Amino acid sequence: MAHVITTACIDCKDGACVPVCPVDCIYEGARTLYIHPDECIDCGICVSACPVQAIYEEFRVPPELAHFTAINREFFDKDVSGLGSPGGAEGRRIACDHAAIAREIPIARAA
């Protein structure tokens, strides 16, 4: 079981979840963060650290956001980021996003 980052993180990338992750499984894409489903140990610390409530346990993702489960998994495929399972984000920023994220209309955020 893994956690899933959803729409509230797009163009926000607050990043409060990154330093609290004990296994370094949260990766930064161009517009959002992604949790590697094979590296996540399902501890849930990221959920409480996320100020925009963008992270859910995989089985608790609201139905209207269910497609983010596949987006998080597919981000690591050779056809998207090509990362596979590198064994830790190590602060690396990936210059791409899943195609579904790239198509998202930017969300206006209050300053």
Image (cartoon, grey):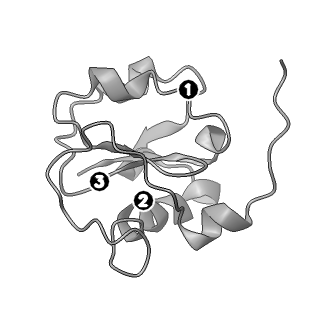
Neighbourhood count class around disc 2 (C-alpha, 10 Å): few under 14, some 14–19, many 20 upward = many
Q: Residue at image x 56%, y 51%?
A: 30
Please tell me whether residue 85 is drawn above or below residue 92 in the rendered image. Answer: below
Q: Secondary structure at mark 3?
A: loop
Q: Residue at image x 17%, y 57%?
A: 86
Residue 110 position within the rendered picture, expressed as x and y whole percent measured from the top left: 84, 22
Q: Quadrant of residue 103?
A: bottom right
Q: Quadrant of residue 54?
A: top right
Which residue is label 1 attached to? 14
Could you tell me if the residues under marks 3 and 2 are in contact, i.e. CB atoms within 8 Å? yes
**Horizontal relation, residue 109 to residue 81: left or right:** right
Quarter of the rendering occupied by the C terminus: top right
Q: Residue at image x 26%, y 28%?
A: 21
Residue 18 position within the rendered picture, expressed as x and y whole percent measured from the top left: 36, 29
Q: Secondary structure at mark 2?
A: helix
Mark 3 or mark 2: which comes first in sequence?
A: 3
Residue 6 position within the rendered picture, expressed as x and y whole percent measured from the top left: 55, 47
Label at residue 79: none
Q: CA distance from mark 3 to mark 2?
A: 7 Å
Q: CA distance from mark 2 to mark 1?
A: 17 Å
Which residue is label 3 attached to? 36
Q: Residue at image x 80%, y 49%?
A: 106
Please tell me whether residue 66 is drawn above or below residue 30 in the rendered image. Answer: below
Q: Quadrant of residue 8?
A: top right
Q: Give the amino acid at mark 2.
A: Asn
Mark 3 or mark 1: which comes first in sequence?
A: 1
Which residue is label 2 attached to? 72
Residue 14 position within the rendered picture, expressed as x and y whole percent measured from the top left: 55, 26
Q: Give the amino acid at mark 3.
A: His
